Image (tube, rainbow, N blue to C red):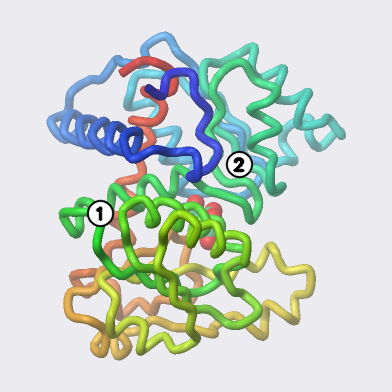
Amino acid sequence: MLKGKDILNTAQFTAQELNLIMNTAANYEYRVKKQEQIKDMAGKVVACLFFEPSTRTRLSFESAANRVGARVISVAGASSSSTAKGETLQDTIRTVDGYIDVIVMRHSEIGSAQVAADNAIHPVINGGDGSGQHPTQALLDIYTILKEKGHLGGQTVTFLGDLKYGRTVHSLGYFMTLYGNKMIFVSPKSLRMPEELTADFRSRGAEIEETEDVQEALGKSDIVYVTRVQRERFADPAEYEKLKGSYIVNRELISKAKKGITILHPLPRVDEISTDVDDYEGAAYFRQAHNGMYVRMALLALVSGSF
Ligand code: NCD
Protein backbone atom coordinates (compact mmCIF):
# COMPACT_ATOMS: atom_id res chain seq x y z
CA MET A 1 0.00 0.00 0.00
CA LEU A 2 2.88 2.41 0.78
CA LYS A 3 5.70 0.82 -1.23
CA GLY A 4 7.51 3.44 -3.31
CA LYS A 5 5.43 6.27 -1.84
CA ASP A 6 6.72 9.61 -0.59
CA ILE A 7 5.64 10.74 2.88
CA LEU A 8 5.31 14.50 2.42
CA ASN A 9 2.28 15.71 4.34
CA THR A 10 -0.53 14.32 6.44
CA ALA A 11 -3.35 15.46 4.14
CA GLN A 12 -2.33 12.57 1.84
CA PHE A 13 -3.26 9.70 4.19
CA THR A 14 -6.30 7.46 4.34
CA ALA A 15 -7.40 5.86 7.61
CA GLN A 16 -6.49 2.50 6.06
CA GLU A 17 -2.88 3.58 5.49
CA LEU A 18 -2.67 4.92 9.03
CA ASN A 19 -3.89 1.57 10.34
CA LEU A 20 -1.16 -0.19 8.41
CA ILE A 21 1.51 2.15 9.81
CA MET A 22 0.22 1.77 13.40
CA ASN A 23 0.11 -2.02 13.12
CA THR A 24 3.56 -2.18 11.57
CA ALA A 25 4.97 0.08 14.29
CA ALA A 26 3.43 -2.15 16.96
CA ASN A 27 4.95 -5.19 15.25
CA TYR A 28 8.41 -3.60 15.34
CA GLU A 29 7.97 -2.47 18.94
CA TYR A 30 7.19 -6.05 19.90
CA ARG A 31 10.16 -7.45 17.97
CA VAL A 32 12.63 -4.87 19.32
CA LYS A 33 11.44 -5.54 22.87
CA LYS A 34 12.06 -9.25 22.48
CA GLN A 35 15.51 -8.38 21.10
CA GLU A 36 15.00 -9.90 17.68
CA GLN A 37 17.80 -9.11 15.21
CA ILE A 38 15.67 -7.61 12.45
CA LYS A 39 16.96 -7.88 8.89
CA ASP A 40 13.94 -6.64 6.92
CA MET A 41 15.96 -3.88 5.22
CA ALA A 42 19.26 -5.77 4.92
CA GLY A 43 21.26 -4.54 1.93
CA LYS A 44 19.41 -1.22 1.78
CA VAL A 45 20.81 2.24 2.50
CA VAL A 46 18.90 5.19 3.99
CA ALA A 47 20.09 8.80 3.55
CA CYS A 48 19.29 11.19 6.39
CA LEU A 49 19.74 14.73 5.07
CA PHE A 50 19.19 17.22 7.87
CA PHE A 51 19.82 20.77 6.73
CA GLU A 52 18.16 22.15 9.92
CA PRO A 53 18.91 21.30 13.56
CA SER A 54 17.44 18.06 14.91
CA THR A 55 17.98 15.67 17.81
CA ARG A 56 14.99 13.34 17.96
CA THR A 57 13.95 13.17 14.33
CA ARG A 58 17.42 12.49 12.95
CA LEU A 59 18.62 10.16 15.68
CA SER A 60 15.39 8.17 15.85
CA PHE A 61 15.40 7.77 12.06
CA GLU A 62 19.04 6.64 12.15
CA SER A 63 18.37 4.29 15.02
CA ALA A 64 15.23 3.02 13.26
CA ALA A 65 17.14 2.36 10.03
CA ASN A 66 19.84 0.48 11.93
CA ARG A 67 17.33 -1.53 13.92
CA VAL A 68 15.44 -2.58 10.82
CA GLY A 69 18.66 -3.83 9.24
CA ALA A 70 19.50 -0.98 6.83
CA ARG A 71 22.65 1.11 6.73
CA VAL A 72 22.67 4.89 7.02
CA ILE A 73 24.51 7.77 5.39
CA SER A 74 23.81 11.24 6.69
CA VAL A 75 24.27 14.97 6.47
CA ALA A 76 23.78 16.90 9.70
CA GLY A 77 23.74 20.66 9.11
CA ALA A 78 23.76 22.59 5.82
CA SER A 79 27.34 23.72 6.41
CA SER A 80 28.75 20.21 6.01
CA SER A 81 27.39 19.48 2.51
CA SER A 82 27.75 21.12 -0.91
CA THR A 83 24.71 23.26 -0.04
CA ALA A 84 27.36 25.51 1.50
CA LYS A 85 29.00 25.78 -1.95
CA GLY A 86 25.75 26.95 -3.49
CA GLU A 87 24.46 23.66 -4.89
CA THR A 88 20.72 23.62 -5.47
CA LEU A 89 18.50 21.20 -3.57
CA GLN A 90 17.48 19.66 -6.91
CA ASP A 91 21.08 18.77 -7.78
CA THR A 92 21.88 17.48 -4.29
CA ILE A 93 18.84 15.20 -4.34
CA ARG A 94 19.48 13.87 -7.87
CA THR A 95 22.98 12.93 -6.75
CA VAL A 96 22.07 11.36 -3.40
CA ASP A 97 19.21 9.46 -5.06
CA GLY A 98 21.84 7.42 -6.91
CA TYR A 99 23.38 6.21 -3.64
CA ILE A 100 20.39 5.12 -1.57
CA ASP A 101 16.99 3.39 -1.31
CA VAL A 102 15.14 5.95 0.87
CA ILE A 103 15.76 9.66 1.55
CA VAL A 104 14.75 11.33 4.82
CA MET A 105 15.13 15.10 4.67
CA ARG A 106 14.65 18.14 6.91
CA HIS A 107 14.98 21.56 5.34
CA SER A 108 14.10 25.15 6.29
CA GLU A 109 11.95 25.90 3.22
CA ILE A 110 8.23 25.15 3.02
CA GLY A 111 7.70 22.89 0.02
CA SER A 112 11.28 21.59 -0.04
CA ALA A 113 10.12 18.01 0.59
CA GLN A 114 8.00 18.18 -2.56
CA VAL A 115 11.00 19.52 -4.52
CA ALA A 116 13.07 16.61 -3.23
CA ALA A 117 10.36 14.10 -4.16
CA ASP A 118 10.12 15.59 -7.66
CA ASN A 119 13.84 15.02 -8.15
CA ALA A 120 14.19 11.54 -6.65
CA ILE A 121 13.21 8.14 -8.00
CA HIS A 122 13.35 6.66 -4.50
CA PRO A 123 10.82 7.49 -1.76
CA VAL A 124 11.33 10.77 0.12
CA ILE A 125 10.21 11.14 3.73
CA ASN A 126 9.68 14.71 4.95
CA GLY A 127 11.40 15.18 8.32
CA GLY A 128 10.09 18.77 8.52
CA ASP A 129 9.94 21.46 5.81
CA GLY A 130 10.21 24.88 7.41
CA SER A 131 6.94 25.86 9.04
CA GLY A 132 5.09 23.57 6.62
CA GLN A 133 4.61 19.98 7.72
CA HIS A 134 6.20 17.25 9.85
CA PRO A 135 4.22 14.14 8.96
CA THR A 136 6.34 11.54 10.74
CA GLN A 137 5.94 13.47 14.00
CA ALA A 138 2.16 13.38 13.56
CA LEU A 139 2.34 9.64 12.95
CA LEU A 140 4.23 9.08 16.18
CA ASP A 141 1.78 11.42 17.90
CA ILE A 142 -1.18 9.26 16.93
CA TYR A 143 0.72 6.08 17.79
CA THR A 144 1.25 7.64 21.22
CA ILE A 145 -2.41 8.66 21.55
CA LEU A 146 -3.42 5.11 20.67
CA LYS A 147 -1.09 3.68 23.33
CA GLU A 148 -1.95 6.22 26.03
CA LYS A 149 -5.71 6.37 25.45
CA GLY A 150 -6.47 3.02 23.81
CA HIS A 151 -8.34 4.67 20.91
CA LEU A 152 -7.95 7.52 18.44
CA GLY A 153 -11.38 9.08 18.11
CA GLY A 154 -14.08 10.96 19.99
CA GLN A 155 -11.74 13.09 22.07
CA THR A 156 -11.21 16.78 22.67
CA VAL A 157 -7.66 17.85 21.87
CA THR A 158 -6.25 21.26 22.74
CA PHE A 159 -3.36 22.52 20.64
CA LEU A 160 -1.44 25.07 22.69
CA GLY A 161 1.33 27.51 21.74
CA ASP A 162 2.78 28.53 18.39
CA LEU A 163 0.15 27.29 15.98
CA LYS A 164 1.29 29.60 13.20
CA TYR A 165 4.84 28.35 12.70
CA GLY A 166 4.56 24.95 14.45
CA ARG A 167 4.67 22.38 11.68
CA THR A 168 3.82 19.51 14.04
CA VAL A 169 0.36 20.92 14.78
CA HIS A 170 -0.27 21.58 11.09
CA SER A 171 0.37 17.89 10.44
CA LEU A 172 -1.47 16.47 13.43
CA GLY A 173 -4.58 18.58 12.73
CA TYR A 174 -5.24 16.60 9.54
CA PHE A 175 -5.18 13.29 11.43
CA MET A 176 -7.58 14.62 14.04
CA THR A 177 -10.11 15.29 11.27
CA LEU A 178 -9.97 11.61 10.25
CA TYR A 179 -11.00 10.35 13.68
CA GLY A 180 -13.75 12.78 14.62
CA ASN A 181 -11.88 14.56 17.40
CA LYS A 182 -12.81 18.07 18.49
CA MET A 183 -9.92 20.54 18.34
CA ILE A 184 -9.43 23.60 20.53
CA PHE A 185 -6.73 26.04 19.35
CA VAL A 186 -5.17 28.16 22.09
CA SER A 187 -2.49 30.67 21.14
CA PRO A 188 -1.53 34.32 21.31
CA LYS A 189 -3.43 36.25 18.60
CA SER A 190 -0.37 36.66 16.37
CA LEU A 191 0.43 32.92 16.47
CA ARG A 192 -2.96 31.54 15.50
CA MET A 193 -3.40 28.51 13.28
CA PRO A 194 -3.20 29.71 9.64
CA GLU A 195 -6.69 30.38 8.33
CA GLU A 196 -6.32 28.20 5.27
CA LEU A 197 -5.52 25.23 7.52
CA THR A 198 -8.45 25.87 9.86
CA ALA A 199 -10.71 26.12 6.80
CA ASP A 200 -9.28 22.90 5.36
CA PHE A 201 -9.79 21.05 8.69
CA ARG A 202 -13.38 22.31 8.82
CA SER A 203 -14.03 21.24 5.24
CA ARG A 204 -12.97 17.76 6.35
CA GLY A 205 -15.65 17.82 9.02
CA ALA A 206 -13.65 18.95 12.06
CA GLU A 207 -15.25 20.76 14.97
CA ILE A 208 -12.90 23.59 15.98
CA GLU A 209 -12.94 26.19 18.73
CA GLU A 210 -10.38 29.03 19.05
CA THR A 211 -9.67 30.76 22.35
CA GLU A 212 -6.94 32.43 24.41
CA ASP A 213 -8.28 30.96 27.67
CA VAL A 214 -6.01 28.02 28.35
CA GLN A 215 -7.56 27.05 31.68
CA GLU A 216 -11.05 26.80 30.26
CA ALA A 217 -9.77 24.77 27.30
CA LEU A 218 -7.89 22.30 29.51
CA GLY A 219 -10.94 21.91 31.71
CA LYS A 220 -12.67 20.06 28.88
CA SER A 221 -9.72 18.40 27.06
CA ASP A 222 -8.68 14.76 27.04
CA ILE A 223 -5.33 15.67 25.50
CA VAL A 224 -3.24 18.84 25.37
CA TYR A 225 -0.59 19.10 22.67
CA VAL A 226 1.90 21.79 23.74
CA THR A 227 4.35 23.44 21.35
CA ARG A 228 7.40 25.67 21.62
CA VAL A 229 7.35 29.20 20.22
CA GLN A 230 9.40 28.63 17.03
CA ARG A 231 12.13 31.21 17.55
CA GLU A 232 13.96 30.41 14.30
CA ARG A 233 10.93 31.42 12.20
CA PHE A 234 10.71 35.00 13.55
CA ALA A 235 12.11 37.77 11.35
CA ASP A 236 12.16 40.12 14.39
CA PRO A 237 13.85 38.80 17.57
CA ALA A 238 11.96 41.39 19.67
CA GLU A 239 8.68 39.85 18.55
CA TYR A 240 9.89 36.44 19.77
CA GLU A 241 10.94 37.89 23.13
CA LYS A 242 7.45 39.35 23.52
CA LEU A 243 5.69 36.07 22.84
CA LYS A 244 7.89 33.47 24.50
CA GLY A 245 6.51 32.41 27.81
CA SER A 246 2.93 33.33 26.75
CA TYR A 247 1.70 29.99 28.08
CA ILE A 248 3.30 27.84 30.72
CA VAL A 249 1.87 24.48 31.63
CA ASN A 250 2.70 23.79 35.25
CA ARG A 251 1.43 21.51 37.97
CA GLU A 252 -1.09 24.06 39.16
CA LEU A 253 -2.68 24.42 35.73
CA ILE A 254 -2.83 20.64 35.37
CA SER A 255 -4.58 20.34 38.75
CA LYS A 256 -7.44 22.41 37.26
CA ALA A 257 -7.53 20.47 33.97
CA LYS A 258 -9.90 17.62 33.12
CA LYS A 259 -9.01 14.54 35.16
CA GLY A 260 -6.70 12.14 33.35
CA ILE A 261 -5.60 14.68 30.74
CA THR A 262 -2.68 13.46 28.61
CA ILE A 263 0.10 15.96 27.91
CA LEU A 264 1.96 15.67 24.62
CA HIS A 265 4.81 17.80 23.24
CA PRO A 266 6.96 17.08 20.18
CA LEU A 267 10.00 18.41 22.10
CA PRO A 268 12.35 20.19 22.46
CA ARG A 269 10.67 22.21 25.20
CA VAL A 270 12.04 25.53 26.26
CA ASP A 271 9.92 26.67 29.22
CA GLU A 272 6.35 26.02 28.06
CA ILE A 273 6.04 22.92 30.27
CA SER A 274 7.67 23.27 33.67
CA THR A 275 9.67 20.33 34.92
CA ASP A 276 7.32 19.88 37.89
CA VAL A 277 4.87 18.36 35.39
CA ASP A 278 7.28 15.60 34.35
CA ASP A 279 6.26 13.13 37.05
CA TYR A 280 2.51 13.64 36.45
CA GLU A 281 1.34 10.26 35.11
CA GLY A 282 -0.33 11.75 32.04
CA ALA A 283 2.90 13.55 31.00
CA ALA A 284 3.63 11.43 27.94
CA TYR A 285 6.17 13.51 26.03
CA PHE A 286 9.23 11.35 26.67
CA ARG A 287 7.27 8.18 25.92
CA GLN A 288 6.11 9.97 22.78
CA ALA A 289 9.72 10.62 21.67
CA HIS A 290 10.55 6.97 22.30
CA ASN A 291 7.58 5.80 20.21
CA GLY A 292 9.03 7.72 17.27
CA MET A 293 11.63 5.04 16.72
CA TYR A 294 9.06 2.28 16.13
CA VAL A 295 6.95 4.44 13.85
CA ARG A 296 10.03 5.36 11.80
CA MET A 297 11.08 1.71 11.54
CA ALA A 298 7.61 1.02 10.12
CA LEU A 299 7.79 3.90 7.65
CA LEU A 300 11.23 3.00 6.33
CA ALA A 301 10.28 -0.66 5.89
CA LEU A 302 6.93 0.12 4.27
CA VAL A 303 8.07 2.72 1.72
CA SER A 304 11.06 0.58 0.73
CA GLY A 305 8.81 -2.47 0.29
CA SER A 306 10.68 -4.40 3.00
CA PHE A 307 7.82 -5.28 5.32
C1 NCD B 1 9.66 19.65 16.25
C2 NCD B 1 10.08 20.19 14.92
O1 NCD B 1 11.24 20.04 14.52
O2 NCD B 1 9.20 20.74 14.24
N1 NCD B 1 10.66 18.85 16.83
C3 NCD B 1 10.65 17.50 16.55
O3 NCD B 1 10.87 17.09 15.44
N2 NCD B 1 10.37 16.67 17.56
C4 NCD B 1 9.14 20.68 17.18
C5 NCD B 1 9.98 21.87 17.47
O4 NCD B 1 11.11 22.01 17.01
O5 NCD B 1 9.49 22.71 18.24
Task: For label 1, count other residues whose C-alpha is less than 10 Å away and answer few (under 14), some (14-19) or many (20+).
Answer: some
Left or right side of 286 for 188: right
Q: Earlier in the sequence, mark 1 or mark 2?
A: 2
Q: Single out the residue that lies furthest toward the left.
A: 34
Residue 276 placement (x, y as % from top left): 30, 80
Front-most of residues 44 and 261:
261
Q: Single out the residue that lies furthest toward the top.
A: 43
Q: Is mark 2 within 8 Å of ligand 1?
A: yes
Front-most of residues 157 and 259:
157
Q: Single out the residue that lies furthest toward the right.
A: 86
User: Does residue 294 appear in this view?
Assistant: no
Q: Which residue is mark 2?
A: 106
Q: Residue at x 27, y 62 (%)?
A: 284
* Disc on res. 49: none
Quadrant in the picture for residue 204: bottom left
Total labels drawn: 2
- The quarter of the image holding the N terminus is top left
- The relative height of residue 173 versus residue 299 in the rendered view (above or below) is below
Q: Secondary structure at mark 2?
A: strand
Q: Secondary structure at mark 1?
A: loop
Q: Which residue is mark 1?
A: 152
* Label 1 to label 2: alpha-carbon separation: 28 Å
Give the amino acid type for the residue marked by disc 2 in the picture.
Answer: Arg
Q: Residue at x 35, y 19 (%)?
A: 69
Number of the front mark, 1 or 2: 1
Residue 216 placement (x, y as % from top left): 35, 89
Give the amino acid type for the residue marked by disc 1 in the picture.
Answer: Leu
- The relative height of residue 188 versus residue 127 in the rendered view (above or below) is below
Q: Residue at x 38, y 45 (%)?
A: 139
